[in-house]
Amino acid sequence: MNDRSKVIACFREAGFRMNTDLFEHRLIAQKLVYLLRLKGVEFVYPFRLYVRGPYSPNLAREYYQHADEFSRCETESTLSPAEADAVAGLTGLFDKSPSLLEIGATYGYLAYEMRQPPEQAYRMVRRMKSFYSNEQIVKGVNRAKQYLFVPTDEEKAALDAELGEWQRAGIRSMRH
């Protein structure tokens, strides 16, 4: 499957019919593909950080040259179960919100691509995206973390132990 077909399949799975005439749609497209790439969906499009977040001129060229295919979401390609899950997780958290996707993708670029510590990446996003409210920035960053963070087995065990204590405490409080 070529990358254009895979992107169209991802958009179809997300319920996103792209209109290349709309800036918001171009922004959504770029950030969806970038975040999916960070989540492990393979695309060859290279991304760099621009004013509005991660951007791929190669991806832009594809959707301009094949605008009709993107708007119809027609492709013979299908996604693997893991790719479909990545799309579902992304749309579930971000709901195709341009501002949240822009903030989340920018944070993802800084934290995962540039390997900045989380606090530094967050501060940089706040500086770069000062035209968004603090609430939007916190939401976008938190959703990116929720989408991209994969806990290790050790972290899962620690979380399970802590949640177990909370559950037992809740049950004890219900008995009294």
Image (spheres, rainbow, N blue to C red):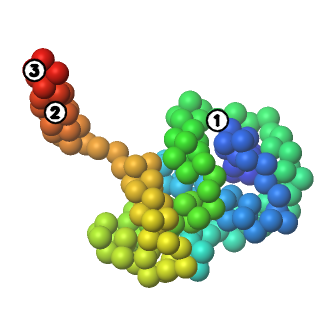
Residue situated in front as seen by the camera: 126 or 149: 126
Image: 18 above or below 161: below
Q: Earlier in the sequence, mark 1 or mark 3?
A: 1
| Residue at (40% x, 49% y) in the render | 146
Q: Residue 67 lies in what quarter of the image?
A: bottom right
Q: Whole-percent x and y of residue 64?
A: 83, 64
Tag shown at residue 166:
2
Q: Earlier in the sequence, mark 2 or mark 1?
A: 1
Question: Are the two marked residues, 3 and 2, in contact with CB atoms closer than 8 angstroms?
Answer: no
| Residue at (62% x, 56% y) in the render | 97
Residue situated in front as seen by the camera: 5 or 68: 68
Mark 2 residue type: Trp
Q: Nearer the viewer, mark 3 or mark 2?
A: 3
Residue situated in front as seen by the camera: 160 or 4: 160
Residue situated in front as seen by the camera: 172 or 136: 172
Label 1: element kind = loop
Horizontal relation, residue 170 to residue 71: left or right: left
Residue wearing tag 3: 176
CA–CA distance in space, label 3 to label 2: 16 Å
Tag shown at residue 46:
none
Q: Nearer the viewer, mark 1 or mark 3?
A: 3
Tag shown at residue 79:
1
Q: Whole-percent x and y of residue 85?
A: 54, 35
Residue furthest front in the image: 176
Image: 100 above or below 164: below
Q: Earlier in the sequence, mark 3 or mark 2?
A: 2
Q: How many marks?
A: 3
Horizontal relation, residue 33 to residue 76: left or right: left
Mark 1 residue type: Leu
Mark 3 residue type: His
